[in-house]
Image: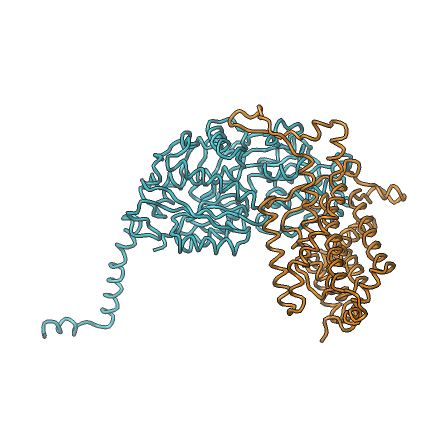
Amino acid sequence: MSKKKAPLSTWTRRDVLKASAASTAIAGAPMFFSRHAYGADFLNNPGDGKTVTLGFNVPQSGAYADEGADELRAYQLAVEHLNGEGDGGMMNTMQPSALKGNGILGKKVEYVTGDTQTKSDAARASAKRMIEKDGVVMVTGGSSSGVAIAVQNLCQETGIIFMAGLTHSNDTTGKDKKANGFRHFFNGYMSGAALGPVLEKAYGKDRRTYHLTADYTWGWTQEQSIIASTENIGWTTEQKVMTPVGAGDFSQYIAPILNSDADTLVLNHYGKDMINSLTQSIQFGLRDKQKNGKDFQIIVPLYSRLMAQGAGENVKGIYGSTNWHWSLQDEGSKAFVKSFGAKYGNPPSQAAHTCYVQTLLYADAAERAGTFEPCQIVSALEGHKFDGTGNGPTEYRAEDHQCFKDVLVVKGKDNPSSQFDLLEVVEVTPRAQVEYAPDHEMFAGGDLGSCNNGA
Amino acid sequence: MDAILVQILNGLDKGAAYALIALGLTLVFGTLGVVNFAHGAIFMIGAFCAVTLNRLLTLSTKVRDESITLFEAFKEVPILTTKFPTIGPIIVDYSVPLAILVAIPIMWGLGLLMERGLIRHFYKRPHADQILVTFGLAIIIQEIVKHYYGANPIPQAAPAAFSGSLNIGALFGLGDNIVYPWWRLIYLSFSLFIISAVFAFLQFTTFGMVVRAGMQDREMVGMLGINIERRFSLVFGLAAVVAGLAGVMYTPILPPDYHMGMDFLVLSFVVVVVGGMGSLGGAVAAGFLLGILQSFASMTQVKAIIPGIDQIIIYLVAVVVLLVLPRGLLGRKGVMED
């Protein structure tokens, strides 16, 4: 007893404090260093199970429901291909690829779906259910930047990988970027950078723009990007007007354009809003007008084939940009269109394309990492360079988890040869022209933080 | 000045839609005492009558699309325009006005079916029950439409002859900037015609006189040996026709989707309350008033002074009107008052 008591009796209070600090550091250090290295347990680890579950969180109701339906078709096709069914689609063209067609890491891929309703709260609730009840290892989906940012935050907090679907706001990989989130889709800045030179060539250096903008994160950043780009070519900005999302009737916002000095209308609207605002602008005779000695023009910076289908004849001759188009002739696009078309009878939309590619990229990262552990997947995706997925050589930039690749400038086709042939690719803008520094002012203010394994 | 004139036209146009829906709501409330939350869905069904007729007229045969080589795609070749190359395209072009003829019997039948099949069982139940059942019905109708027609808006074209715009300024020597789409002018005229027809019907026919008497004192009319229940059922049908026609004619202005009824319903209820519960004239006046105010509030100059005013103007006016005139603009004493 005395032997045990003796050393203690010589300790001062300071010694005890030092010792406890040191032991805390020693005890904590191995965990800190090994947490990532040894693949300690992580949230929803499928363990020895024969299956792994992915969560497809898409708008199945609300304004973007048809877009969501196309996303879901793409996800189902991706699962089919990952499990070795069908013709394999882009799995045959993606390079490099660790995919084997036997699921992911030998586990059969299963999936659950959720309805985001194009509302952030509903999307979060649906993703939460997938994570907590269905045990998904990855959540993917979108069709609205508001939704994507909300779900990305949730995935970061809980420790699940989020592979963003269609989200075009600069903020998704800008001020709201997160370590567990990855975006393959392009963004507002890239649309502006790609469109600028084409617009200059088509409409000259002297134009006055009037912006109608959807009043949420995507609209704000797209407007900012397009203004920067058009002012760079000498255009001036006459007016910026925010419109509520889902306004339906835009006539009260369109009528004042007639009385302004603007000769170009920029519609920073998407989905149903774009279809309505474009249709109504044309009903008000904007495209028949002459302003400042020039033909009045309308620009829709973010286009999709589904929207073009909705707007019908009105899209003819109108410029915009898109992430991908089914008419591209590279091997990856052809393989995907063939596979999707054979299964569903129509070509995929850009939303379907980005969702399909994101699923393959996640699976490939897991194969390369040899685990479903989120931090290992983050490491596998950061800086990953790949090709054969329809956009030419592409890189997942490590600094912000944004994919960098070529961007398409498109125009509503005057004489469509088929019901799907609504947009023509005017220019493939090279990656270098749409690239920006990670700390660019339009993307500043955010922090990726560190990845979260959730356990 | 030009901008103000165009915004007045815009307001009248928007107000015309609100007024037509609110008129039907008020008719149903004034006669049957039911707060019908499914009325917006009836407006939406009217719009889909136009969509359906257009689809029927453009029924197609599927022909292999040779321009697509990567997979087996099919294009649709309309049967009507192929078989009748002269008259076929004209009929398709005028599908929206033609839909009026189709919508009248459909909406009439649907109105009677809704009233006889469901709503009459709730006459003596509290307003909360009526709201729940009609709101539930609206959601069911919406989901059915979404199931068959999808969630995306389906554009309907106005006849080519009316697809452009009228330079009203040039017509009256006021400059080139007062331009207004033809179809919106037609919609405004059509609405004024329907509103006048409903008022004339209620004012100058025996049926209308009985209905008005029933709105004043239902029991007394019943005691006089008139089957007021039957008359009121027909009024429900009439309200459905009015809302349905408003929906049909609105399709070239706003591509219809399954949710359009709900978008209009909330505003129309505000219109009814501002106009005065049970007052037909009040509903029409409030519809136009709120439409015009909403248009003015969206002007850049106004928004520069009070940002976001365009989003709240209708509700702000409703609050002010109800504070100053608790029964609304033309509300009658005793309606919804215990």
Looking at the image, is A158 positioned above or below residue B50? Answer: below
Q: Position of residue B175 (x, y in %)?
A: 86, 43
Quadrant in the picture for the N terminus of chain A: bottom left
The front one of A322 and B327 is B327
Of all chains in the rendering, the one displayed in orange is: B
Q: Is residue B300 visible?
A: no
Q: Is residue A151 left or right of residue A425?
A: left
For the point 61% across and 39% down, which residue is it? A307
Looking at the image, is B36 positioned above or below residue A81? Answer: below
Residue B267 location, quadrant: bottom right
For the point 78% across and 53% down, which residue is it? B16
Quadrant in the picture for the C terminus of chain A: bottom left
Looking at the image, is B38 positioned above or below residue B76? Answer: below
What colour denotes chain A?
cyan
Q: Is residue A127 left or right of residue A196?
A: left
Looking at the image, is A4 positioned above or below residue B68? Answer: below
Q: Position of residue B71 (x, y in %)?
A: 51, 28
Taking the view exactly as shown, the residue that stands out farthest to the right is B173
